[in-house]
Image (cartoon, grey):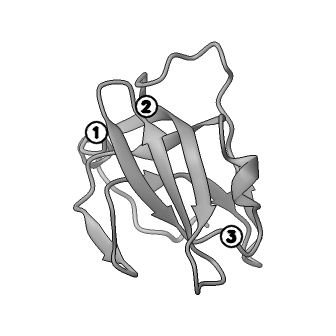
C-alpha cells in the first residue's frame, strides 16, 4: 500500500462526490454482475450502472443512501448510459462492501 503513486490534493478536489438515494435498482437482464439504478442526487436524478450484482442483491440498495462520483464522463454499458459511479469498499480478494450513509444526511450533500 505504501508504494502506490501519490497525488496532489488538488487532484482529489476535481471529483464531485455526493450523497445519493437509490430510488430503483434492478439486475441488467442477461448479465451476472450488472445492476442498473436510478439515483436521486438532490438537484438531479441519474442512471448508474454498477458491477456488484454477483455479491449484492439489487433490492438491498433500494431506498438507501450511498456516495456517488457525479462528474465522470458518461459511459455506455450494455446499451445503458451510466452517468455516475457508486463508491464501494473492495478487499484484495474481490469481496465488495457497501458504504451506507446515515439517513440524516440530506440527498445531494457534497462529500470530501
- Rendered residue at 30%/33% (across/down): 44
Q: CA distance from mark 3 to mark 1?
A: 30 Å
N-term mark: 3 or 2: 3
Query: Label 2: which residue?
Result: 112
- Rendered residue at 40%/32% (across/down): 41
Label 3: element kind: loop
Q: Is residue 65 above or below residue 6?
A: above
- Rendered residue at 41%/67% (across/down): 5
Q: Quadrant of residue 14?
A: top left
Query: Label 3: which residue?
Result: 53
Q: Nearer the viewer, mark 3 or mark 1?
A: 3
Q: Quadrant of residue 104?
A: top right
Q: CA distance from mark 3 to mark 2?
A: 27 Å
19 horizontally vs 58: left or right = left
Q: CA distance from mark 1 to mark 2?
A: 8 Å
Q: Nearer the viewer, mark 3 or mark 2?
A: 3
Please name whichever residue, 56 or 10, is drawn nearer the observer in this view of the structure. Answer: 56
Q: Tag on residue 92? A: none
Query: Label 1: which residue?
Result: 13
How far across and how far down the image is residue 22, in percent? 56, 41
Badge 1 local density, few (<14 within 10 Å), some, or many (20+)? few
N-term mark: 1 or 2: 1
99 horizontally vs 107: left or right = right
How far across and how far down the image is residue 39, in percent? 46, 42
Amino acid at each position: 500500500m505504501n508504494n502506490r503513486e501519490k497525488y496532489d490534493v488538488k487532484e482529489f478536489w476535481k471529483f464531485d462526490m455526493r450523497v445519493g438515494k437509490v430510488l430503483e435498482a434492478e439486475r441488467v437482464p442477461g448479465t451476472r454482475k450488472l445492476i442498473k439504478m436510478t439515483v436521486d442526487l438532490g438537484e438531479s436524478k441519474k442512471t448508474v450502472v454498477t458491477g456488484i450484482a454477483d455479491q449484492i442483491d439489487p433490492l438491498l440498495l433500494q431506498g438507501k443512501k450511498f456516495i456517488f462520483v457525479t462528474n465522470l464522463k458518461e459511459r455506455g454499458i450494455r446499451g445503458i448510459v451510466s452517468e455516475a459511479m457508486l463508491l464501494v469498499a473492495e478487499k484484495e480478494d474481490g469481496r465488495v462492501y457497501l458504504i451506507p450513509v446515515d439517513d440524516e444526511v440530506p440527498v445531494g450533500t457534497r462529500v470530501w
